[in-house]
Image (spheres, coloured by chain):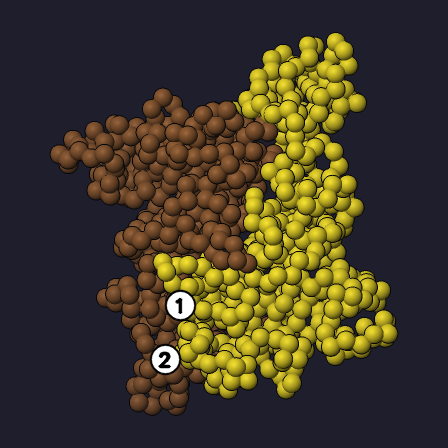
Chain colours: A yellow, B brown
Amino acid sequence: MDTTRVLAAALPLHEGAEITVSGWVHRVRDLGGITFVLLRDRSGLAQLVYDTPPDFANESVISVRGTVAANEKAPGGYEVKVVESTTLGPAAGELPLSVNQTPENVGIDAILDNRIISLRNPRIRHIFEVQASIVKYFAEWLRNQDFTEIKSSKIIGSGTEGGTGLFSVDYFGETVYLAQSPQFYKQAMVASGLERVFEIGAAYRAEKHDTPRHLNEYVSLDVEMGFIENEVDLMDLEVGLLSHIFAGVARDHGDILGEYGATVPSTEAMAHTPRISHDDAKKLIKERTGKSAFEINPEGERVLCEWAQETHGVEAVFVYAFPRKKRPFYTYPEGLKTRSFDLLFRGLEITTGGQRIHDYNTLLDTLPKFGLTEEGLGDYCKIFKYGCPPHGGFAIGLERITQQILGLHNVKEASLFPRDRKRVRP
Amino acid sequence: MDTTRVLAAALPLHEGAEITVSGWVHRVRDLGGITFVLLRDRSGLAQLVYDTPPDFANESVISVRGTVAANEKAPGGYEVKVVESTTLGPAAGELPLSVNQTPENVGIDAILDNRIISLRNPRIRHIFEVQASIVKYFAEWLRNQDFTEIKSSKIIGSGTEGGTGLFSVDYFGETVYLAQSPQFYKQAMVASGLERVFEIGAAYRAEKHDTPRHLNEYVSLDVEMGFIENEVDLMDLEVGLLSHIFAGVARDHGDILGEYGATVPSTEAMAHTPRISHDDAKKLIKERTGKSAFEINPEGERVLCEWAQETHGVEAVFVYAFPRKKRPFYTYPEGLKTRSFDLLFRGLEITTGGQRIHDYNTLLDTLPKFGLTEEGLGDYCKIFKYGCPPHGGFAIGLERITQQILGLHNVKEASLFPRDRKRVRP
């Protein structure tokens, strides 16, 4: 390993010393006789000072030996006076997309078509540093609550949720499908005796919508928990989980939040997240917009979050008691309603969850109402036939929560290599 | 949440108190007048004492209120004298597979055909508790070394590794594929400036082999790192990483290792892991078996690990300097050999890794030798065209390392819902 390498952010610790820095050529400024080069590495930017003009294009990867000197005009207050410069990976001269400009004026298609290059822009790359922290704190908090991480198959013989919206796979001549969610498997693992499980994995939706809030492949942060009383336990759980994620992101990435002009709700604010029934939510939307609707549409989601901010000081709200016909067959019924909920955050649904039917006979009675049969669901019903505790869970879309934390316009910005109706490359 | 619930393992802390325990009915012993029930929850087993015979089948889920009393014959030394017993989820009487028997005499097909039930057997479930710890410590160690977790797409427009062995997906009428590895993406993310990345995700191989060491879908623990000197850096990295994983598993799951008669190599032993060239490995296999072979076959892998144990005190060995024709096109060449390696552990290859070609022109010169073109590889070559540091990485098969730690006969035992030539359910 290059043990003598110093990261850009660590230069202040090495004033006067001869060190090595390595990274990408972010920008070159030739002042005649002296050349300033901004070097970019994973920690940030460093100013290099060349006596003779170096011969490399922007984005070339170089390794430089030199002496660290204070210079209040340099990023971080220090620069490196170059003694020796080696080009490790030369770059072709003409970039398909500028890396060192602010990406705000570049269209989403140009950013995604040139993903290999656009990810080099620090501001864009930072999205995925925040995303990595979300994953870390999601798992950390759940492990601390005695949840076990599982990895279930994404190749399924049949669709639990009805069979529509599935991508088909040719599996040695047999048609199988990509899983829309690990719903079946996470319920099975609760019933297996693990009781509390989570999964971080890909989910697939073969839906043709092309909106700023949809992806055809996304990362689902799934939680399932046994021995709950009802869906209130799950909403409580999610408040604790999100508070931990928000606090961790704020601690690790305050600088990136600042760059995006973003903040995260405090743990105290999250504790005040209001909970409103689906019926009351529709009434409230009608009062505020004058429009009535059968569903809570995107405008309604925004109105509810504004209401939560005004009345409870937090831009999040749980909507519970969805009608049975709006939820999947496995949702625990309560009269014409269900023990289910969505979490809206800053005007967007980021979670769907609820208690599930755990009684075998109740499930069998329910299937015909949804046009389903026990046989058609494969092994699903066996989970409940042989003893299953009351349980429920929820899923958070990783890209959506990343989008909402940073205030991104399009969820595709929060996917490294997004897949949509037209995009399967790079 | 059921705040009054006490886990089986915590009974000793509640002697004399009235508490609630909940879980699965593991076994019932009716002694006439008194009935002993073994209750199973995520922490272990608890003995319940009923004055009147309870009316439930094995595997029913119950919640019991009762008083904790010492009894040296009970598991953990304490039992619960039942005051009130509620059945939360009744089980059908006849189980397709016994849960409370040792699974050793049950065939792998019966275990996998009845996966929903077989996972309830504590010994089988414990495999996945160990697996969850492997994932945890893998990520933990890499984060501590400044690696960033990434999530790349599993749907790819074309195959980087040549196009064979790929499952095809119908993507809105277009034929695309399931990724064999995140190779392209992890290299792209090193070049993006993250420098050090890891991914935990599914990988797919459409290969028809049906052996105890192959799966068609597995979880790949991928690592990629920039600014390396050569493949030695990567082997050093992997020794540190595996040592951390082994130590963590031993600390968290000493009881499970004991149950399986398994141990893990100490950090000191791992530091002595020998490194042997592919040529020398073949010579050594010939000396020990009298047979010469073009490849290191499964027998050869076992022989090499025995040699490592005898001479270096560790059942692991790196084989490096594989010939060019045995490695993918992107492997960094060194004459007729490559800067690549495998790690064999207890007679099985659990890792393939190596330095990659990072120079654009070297890559372009290499492609025709493998019958490939720049266009055929989609955006892959762009990673290197615009400046890329020397880098490399490796991947560990999660199911294989789980298998080798616990000494499982078949890698399918280490997959919750394995996919093979004939199996896409449950």
Does residue B259 appear in this view?
A: yes
| Left or right relative to A207: residue B394 | left
What residue is drawn where x is 67% and y is 48%?
A413
The quarter of the rendered structure image containing the C terminus of chain B is bottom left
Mark 1 / mark 2, whichever is N-terminal: 2
Q: Amino acid at mark 1?
A: Pro
Measured Cα–Cα span from mark 1 to mark 2 = 22 Å
**How far across and how far down the image is residue A334, in percent?**
62, 84
Residue name at image x 38 percent, y 48 percent: B165
Nearest the viewer among A39 and A176 is A176
- In what quadrant of the picture does the N terminus of chain B appear? bottom right
Q: Residue at x 61, y 34 (%)?
A: B193
Residue placed under numbered mark 1 in the picture = B426
**Count of picture labels:** 2
Residue B148 sits above or below residue B166 on the image: above
Q: As rendered, which of B351 and B426 lies closer to the eye?
A: B426
Kindly state the secondary structure of the residue where label 2 is placed.
loop
- Look at 25% across and 27% down and name the residue there: B280
Image: B29 above or below B410: below
Of all residues shown, which one is farthest toward the left?
B290
Q: Position of residue B425 (x, y in %)?
A: 39, 66
Give whichever of A123, A134 is nearer the camera: A123
Residue B137 at x, y percent in the picture? 48, 47
Label 2 Cα neighbours within 10 Å, binned few <14 / some 14-19 / many ≥20: many
Amino acid under disc 2 = Asn
Query: Is there any visible trace of residue A16 in the rendered image?
Result: no
Q: Secondary structure at mark 1?
A: loop
Checking the image for residue B58, the label placed there is 2
- The chain identifier of the residue carrying mark 2 reads B
**In the picture provided, is B155 more to the left or to the right than A112?**
left
